[in-house]
Image (cartoon, rainbow, N blue to C red):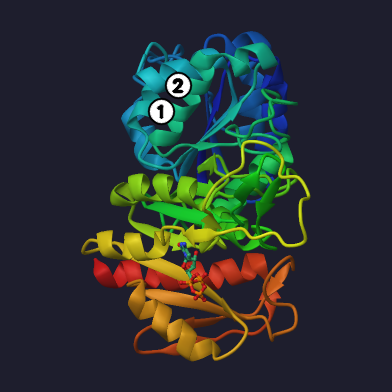
Amino acid sequence: MLQGKKIVLGITGSIAAYKSCLIIRQLIKKGAEVQVVITPAGKEFITPITLSALTHKPVISEFFSQRDGTWNSHVDIGLWADAMLIAPATASTIGKMANGIADNMLITTYLSMKAPVFVAPAMDLDMYAHPSTQKNLQTLLSYGNHIIEPGTGFLASTLEGKGRMEEPENIVAQLESFFAKGETMRGKKVLITAGPTYEKIDPVRFIGNYSSGKMGFALAEECASRGAEVEFVCGPVSSSMKTQNPRIHRIDVESAKQMYAVCVEKYPQMDSAILCAAVADFTPDNVADQKIKRTGDDMIIRLTPNPDIAASLGKMKKEGQQLVGFALETNDEESNAQGKLKRKNFDFIVLNSLNDKGAGFRTDTNKITIITAESKEEFPLKSKADVAKDIVNKLVALQTCNK
Ligand code: CTP
């Protein structure tokens, strides 16, 4: 995947700079060409001689070459590269990148870069957790840069182990997978709903359903790995469910009404939405302030309808936007799905039947049929990650048709 790829490796002043040698070795072993651009502080941690011996190219650090005074053109490097990787990236460099402070060769190269940029932060936890660093990382994401870090994405709630630079082999693996996939959704914004909703009865009870959220998480990762920015509206799922890709912006909600409010606010700014959540159709009329006590023989909870998120977005849908829905059915699957497709103004609907073994709730696999107004396509049983690929392929095909 990296054969013949031209990579600009930016190195900054962090103790993790020694790991750049390992990154270079692996990139070169996989057939890439590497041009190092190093900051003045970076040179305090690793010598240009070591780096140029590994890359077989002079290391660039000054605007003018020290040997003969020729000008190092950051514009040419920006055009030459297939990707720029900044590893390790200090808080200072991340701040300069976010704010365009071009006081060294690395930042001018970054600002001229035409290729995708990958950033592997390296700093201590306090610096990483500071709102300034977090804001700058957000800004880099909004520029379309890729943040590479260990574990879950930096928007995850836990900061454990954060700031440490990702291991060289994982950094190289991310570059490889980037080149393998192609960013078919780069620049696109997708809203994805996932998981169940909980409708409160009293402070300790709710009406919920068996949805695990796995299909929605797989869709979010798939879209993000193709370059999309994902607004990921997530109902109450297990705390072990975490998103990996920093391009996934997770918004946790509990009830259908909360999910509805986020979705109608976000959808106008989106290119598409995939509504994978198992939304409760009804909610208790009254939520008791205190735990309901056992009294009498019967207990009646009166329910009122929830807003239909899908139908509302279907009404809001503008030319060029797509809307994808799900239908989990137990009987008359196709005709039910067809009905929902029309009623909710979906571009296509993903049907899974509870009658298929391995499909539906709480499984790691799914078996789907994609239904449009004109066509029906059945897929075999696959992992949810692979099912997500099929669904996203269909969405990308629609987006390409709409261009
Ligand atoms: N959906 C939604 N908001 C709701 C209910 C459903 O966005 N309040 C979405 C789901 O995320 C899914 C699609 O609509 O993409 C179909 O969901 P489903 O519950 O099967 O549809 P309903 O219209 O509730 O139909 P049914 O009569 O089968 O319950």
User: Which secondary structure lies at badge 1?
Assistant: helix
Q: CA distance from mark 1 to mark 2?
A: 6 Å
Q: Is residue 262 visible?
A: yes
Residue at the image position 46 percent from the left and 13 percent from the top: 67
Image quarter where the C terminus lies is bottom left
In the picture shown, does residue 379 fall above or below 85? below
User: Which secondary structure lies at badge 2?
Assistant: helix
Residue 252 vs residue 215, the one in the foreground = 252
Q: Is residue 3 visible?
A: no
Residue 38 vs residue 155, the one in the foreground = 155
Q: From the image, tell me which residue sits under label 1.
A: 110
- Locate residue 297 relative to residue 267 in the image: left or right: right
Q: From the image, tell me which residue sits under label 2.
A: 106
Residue at the image position 72 percent from the left and 40 percent from the top: 291
Spot occupied by residue 285 in the image (x, y as percentages of width and height):
51, 53
Spot occupied by residue 182 in the image (x, y as percentages of width and height):
48, 58
Residue at the image position 49 percent from the left and 81 percent from the top: 370
In the picture shown, does residue 305 fall above or below 98? below
Q: For the view shown, which residue lies furthest in the front direction?
A: 296
In the picture shown, does residue 403 fall above or below 144? below
Spot occupied by residue 33 in the image (x, y as percentages of width and height):
55, 43
Q: Residues within 10 Å of mark 1 (few under 14, many from 20)?
A: many
- Locate residue 169 relative to residue 183 in the image: left or right: right
Image quarter where the N terminus lies is bottom right
Q: Of the residues shown, which amino acid type is indicated by label 2? A: Leu
Q: Is ligand 1 closer than 8 angstroms to the Cβ of mark 2?
A: no
Residue 205 vs residue 234, the one in the foreground = 205
Q: Residues within 10 Å of mark 2 (few under 14, many from 20)?
A: many
Residue at the image position 36 percent from the left and 15 percent from the top: 102
| Disc 1 and disc 2 in contact, CB within 8 angstroms | yes
Q: Of the residues shown, which amino acid type is indicated by label 1? A: Tyr
